[in-house]
Image (tube, grey):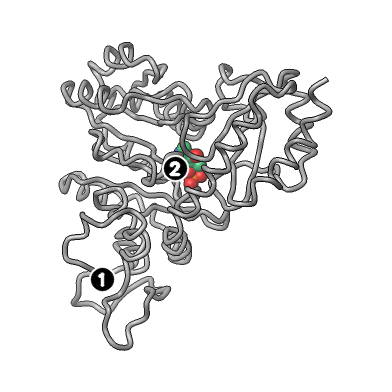
Amino acid sequence: MPEDSRDLRPATLAVTTGRPPHEPDQPLNHPLMMASTYVAGGDREYGRYGNPTWSAFEDTLGALEGGRALAFSTGMAATTTVLDLVGHDALVVAPAHSYTGTLLELADLESRGRIRTKLVDITDTEAVVAAVEDAALVWFESPTNPALELADIAAISEAAHAAGAYVVVDNTFATPINQRPLTMGADIVVHSATKYLAGHSDALLGAVVTANDELYAVLKGRRDLLGAVPGTLEAWLAARGLRTLHLRVERAQQNAAELVRRLGGHPALSEVRYPGFGAIVSIVLTKGELSADLLCRTTELWVHATSLGGVESTLERRRRWKAEPRTIPEGLVRLSVGVEDVEDLWADLEQALAPLGD
Ligand SMILES: *Cc1c(COP(=O)(O)O)cnc(C)c1O
């Protein structure tokens, strides 16, 4: 590893960061270190404060996002830890179409008098800039889940900082391959590493990343106390997943762009939403809920499942979840495009959509 890794490109960082030193008999990968405690006298002391297997994942993700990363047990553990940064009764501004878990958490904190929240149309930059005036924390998702709206992160961050607010971006959908929010004005990046970073639908994990040393120390302190630490096996799997992040994202978004091109004007669909990057596509069935449910039941390769960002293609009707906002159409199906051959993905979608277009 060169001393200064900042000049290396993402593909190289993904493959080379977070490795043991190149010395005789060192393994190329950090071993899975199962340890709840360490012999006293060093820096580690206890398993809740740190683990070298977590560090392999954290060092790699930190290099990709341009900051220092902390792994958490899940994306929601990372989210709740970050929301815990703000004081009592502070205002949190967030997109109306945030991830449902984030929306539920915000509503729960508000209902218990812990924070105040303001949900905004994140595409309306002027309105968001006005809304952040009294905020303590501005939460972004861009693209949003599953509406796939984009925010002007730089402009809103500038207004948020002028108001003295923290800027947080949930970068789960874009991944650092497509978007590095810390270079656009964000103070903190949050990830559901369960999705693209780990990438194989076999592990739950979350992460926060910041380039601000003070914030890093506060967040590390909160993780130590709240105890929302990652499982060691999960961190190891996610560190392995990161080695191919760039390849998986590139291939999946090539597939997504091609499917979007072919889906355009399909008689079964009233809308195809795609932000122009990433591998999530939302389609709206002309005949609504019933035909959306039918689509999810009649694909063969595409798996009917929630979650996203795995190597395999999945789909689901989002409004089957009670917490999904009413402004998301009943007939919206979110496609998480995987890395299979696009011709096979298309053939399967085409046969499932064909009876729904008459
Ligand atoms: C899944 C998801 C989360 C929550 O992550 P978990 O790992 O499931 O806790 C947060 N944000 C977004 C955008 C997600 O898709």
The tag earlier along the polypeptide, 1 or 2, is 1
Q: Which image quarter holds the C terminus? A: top right
Label count reads 2
Using the image, tell me which numbered label, if any, was put on residue 323.
Answer: none
Percent x, y of residue 199: 51, 53
Which residue is at a point 40% across and 18% down the rendered structure image?
123
Q: Which image quarter holds the N terminus? A: bottom left
Q: Is residue 70 visible?
A: no
Instruction: Give the image quarter of residue 33.
Output: bottom left
Q: Secondary structure at mark 1?
A: loop
**Residue on which disc 2 sits:** 76
Which residue is at a point 29% across and 88% down the rendered structure image?
24
Tags 1 and 2 touching, CB below 8 Å: no
Q: Is residue 299 visible?
A: yes
Q: Name the one closer to the observer, 275 or 80.
A: 275
Which residue is at a point 31% across and 52% down the rendered structure image?
64
Three-letter amino acid code at the position of disc 2: Met
Three-letter amino acid code at the position of disc 1: Glu
**Residue on which disc 1 sits:** 45
Q: Secondary structure at mark 2?
A: helix
Q: Name the one closer to the observer, 325 or 241.
A: 241
Instruction: Give the image quarter of residue 229.
Output: bottom left
Which of labels 1 and 2 is toward the front? Answer: 2
Give the CA separation, mark 1 to mark 2. 27 Å
Q: Is residue 280 above or below residue 226?
A: above
Would you call the spot at circle 1 few (<14 residues within 10 Å), some (14-19), or many (20 or more)?
A: some
Percent x, y of residue 179: 35, 39
Is disc 2's CB within 8 Å of ligand 1?
A: yes
Left-right relation of 338 to 204? right
Percent x, y of residue 306: 62, 41
